[in-house]
Amino acid sequence: MNLFRNNTYLYTTAFLFFVGLSLVVVILPALYNQKNNAPLPGTEPLREDALAGKHVFIANGCVACHSQQVRNVAMDNVWGPRPNVAADYAHNTRMHWWMNTATLMGTERTGPDLTNIGTRLPSVDWHLLHLYNPRAVVEESIMPAYPWMFKVTTHVEEGDKVVNVPTEFLRGQEGTVVATREALQLVAYLQSLQQAPLPDGTVTPAFLYKSQAPAATAQTTTTDAAPAEAVVDGAAIYAANCQACHQATGTGLKGAFPPLKGSAIVQNDNPEVLIDIILQGYNAREEYGEMPAIGTINHLKPEEITAIINHERTSWGNSAREVSVAEVKDIIAMLESKKNNP
Amino acid sequence: MRPARTLLTYILLLTIPALPLAGYAQPVAEQSAPLLAQPGILITLVLILIPLLAAFIFMIWQVRRTLLRLQWQKQPTTQADQLEYLEGEAINAARLQRKPTLVYQLSGRELAGANTPDDSRGIIQQASNEHVIPFVAEKKKAQSRPAVDPKLTRLILWYLGSATCWLVIGTTVGEYLGIKFVSPDADTVPWLSFGRLRPVHTNAVFWGWSTLAMLGLGYYVVPKVSNTAIASIRQGWQTLILVNAAVALGSLCLMNGINNAGGEYREYVWPVMALFGLGLIITLINFLRTVARRTTTEIYISNWYILSAIIFVLVITVIAYWPTWQNGLGETIVQGYYMHQGVGMWFMLFNLGLVYYFLPQQLNKPIYSYSLGILAFWAQILFYTLIGTHHFVFSSIPWWLQTVAIVGSMGMLIPVIAGTTNFFMTLKGGWNKIASSYTLPFYVTGIIFYFTGSLQGTAEAFRFTNLLWHFTDFTVAHSHLTMYGIIAFLLWASIYALVPRLTGHEPPQWLVGAHFWLAFLGMMFYTIPLMIGGTLRGLMWMEGKPFIESVVLMAPYWLWRAIGGSLMWLSHLLFAYNFYRMVVGVRAAHPAATPVREALA
């Protein structure tokens, strides 16, 4: 056979065979896919500070542990209300001549997926403390700490973002921890990561392998697929929405997030203020971080809010009466009307 | 009748190691009934069991042999034993007969006779009459080969030396990363942060260690099987400098936060990778010129694989890095293609070429089938090229592309089985040589993992197994079983086979053995816990448990990974020392005076 003896034939054949196959499975599909893709209506490219934050995210190799893709399988429902579609990535283009497009889909989930982190964890203060040292908010976390994105100073200047760090994580340093611009940009990027709703009339792609993960749908608070008769587990919804800051023990973190254990607001016979804070957020106390409007951001339903507050009112030694869904619905309606007609 | 019964006994015995596994699998099966009915899972379990079963059969065989020997020893065979069965006069007669045997001694000259020893053909290598009990088995030394051009030797040694440096550097980083899973607050230096160091580790062992070692060995094999001299030694040096520069610069960039925006093994930015590509172009031209002026009619199969591998890695580097075309989601399609072709079309293909030369050479017999090698060559190109997208199953890239990747992964059965059959049939009849060689154990390990590791990859590509294992540490275990179990072991085998022939210096054999066992056991301690932990973690995610619980679950498995990693790292230090000894040698200690040595002196 000629191929055995003629080096030109042999290597040219191998080269053309490989390039031909590559053309079919890579080059053409890649070109076709990025040409036939457009951002979802209503979404915008990253703002300046979020874009700068994306650079920080890339430079520190966060993609090594954090994916950004909600696959169309039921187990991924915890990371976002719907599977990602190609359009979700349409805003990602090259940021520099020397750098590739950063879709940052990732191949490892050593840490949680970040597709919808802006919705799941909206608190800036939580993110800053978590970046300063993840173990300050999540004891079991193995994420690296990023203390070099903060400075410890005795002179807090006007406009500085102060981070309330519990003393045991200051490693003996004296002073106040202040976030650098880098840290604030990174948090701005994380906050920008939100799954946009599909335009009206679009069929939402289904989650596959549903039978494999029956618990996954019940766990998520953001999905609207939860059957009405399902038992709403207050502890699980608390874990998904509140625990990051207020902790599983309800004690919060000294100097960062207020305790719910023994709290007068939580145990008040009238749950009006408590429900208002869950829906609208709260920032009246200097010594603690700002509470985001978690109920509104995560679209919590009255049943879920009832489950959360009953969990809070009866756990950790708290002993207030349980409230009913009807009562919560009334209060929500009352707060709505108050907001609309002040 | 008897062989049949023995066979049955063995088969029954073989099921024993599977029992604890089955027991472990039960509670899992309750939660998710079809798990053990999933083909991907079953295939993986069988693949993991294959090396264990092989070891178990070997053990049974050894025990049986020992038992038979003991039985045989019980029978009265010596004269002293027979005395017990004699009576009366017969005892005295026997005693008298035995007396001279008690005082008889060898003179030490029975074989040599009265002549002085003489070794006119230079055959005797290990003359000794010392009776020391060896702690490790003595292995054969390297046969001397026709002289190699000293300039080429120097070039090859520099390639292998810098590869060894990158191995030590890259795995020191890897070891530190493994420790960070157990102790995340080990340091707070930005340059040593996990996300920045991880690609430093992977890229240094890919482009530094494996690539440079492969090229160095290629500079020996390509001209050797063409039966001619290398076209240009000077170009060899240019490639060496360029590739080393790319890895050094790339590592510094990564630690400084300059990277290519995600995508495994594509973290170096393109200006850095351009150096790498330029280096490979130079060597490709050099090798093509060498093959063109070969003095053999045919192109030996090694050169099919080696030169094609260089052509293909250049193609994938250009496709992946060309800075003006991908701008959007195309990046992810290219990423799947790039990372898998890098492994399959560069490291695997090149190493297969090396094995097609070194394995027959070490066994001193031809390769079993030339045709199988060619079948595997074309099948590898056809199927491997298709499978890149299996890293993004269920993601937002087209469904048909994912299906093509899964089908291609199935097609990989053909080249893998063809290659493995070829190597094992070549080994057939030569198994007894393994015990007396310090390179063959590395080859056999590499070939076994070529089979199990590659097929594990096929099983992992199925949609269900993706559900279970994707995003977990199972994939990390898989990449170590393959890049380490296959590539690194085959490279060590070839380095131990080649360097003593170039320099005339042998590595200390017991340290080669220590290197082998530390690397092998370390890899087992590294991968098996990660596979178990990865599976449990995947199940936990499928059940919808809170994420942090799966982090807590992994803690002991990550600890085992750090322990296994430490053993692997230690073995690399031993390898580096062995390499040093092979290059520099050791000032000969005064050999004990023996009759043969005296005569030879």
Image: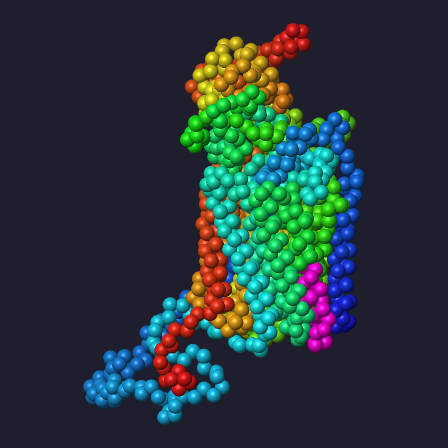
Q: Is residue A223 above or below residue B198?
A: above
Locate residue B41, reporting x and y percent. 58, 49
Q: Is residue A116 magenta?
A: no
Q: Nearer the viewer, residue A337 or B362?
A: B362
Identified at 60% across, 56% down, the residue is B244
Q: Is residue B300 magenta?
A: yes
Query: Magenta region's main secondary structure?
Result: helix
Q: Is residue B548 visible?
A: no
Quarter of the figure with residue B228: bottom right
In which quadrant is the C terminus of chain B drawn? bottom left
Q: Is residue A255 above or below residue B601?
A: above
Identified at 34% across, 76% down, the residue is B131
Locate residue A44, reporting x and y percent. 72, 29
Give the number of marks.
Answer: 0
Locate residue B555, reporting x and y percent. 47, 41
Q: Is residue B232 above or below residue B523?
A: below
For the record, the magenta segment spans B280-304
Locate residue B256, reporting x and y percent. 58, 43
Q: Is residue A293 visible?
A: yes
**Name of the residue lying farthest toward the bottom:** B114
Quarter of the figure with residue B34: top right
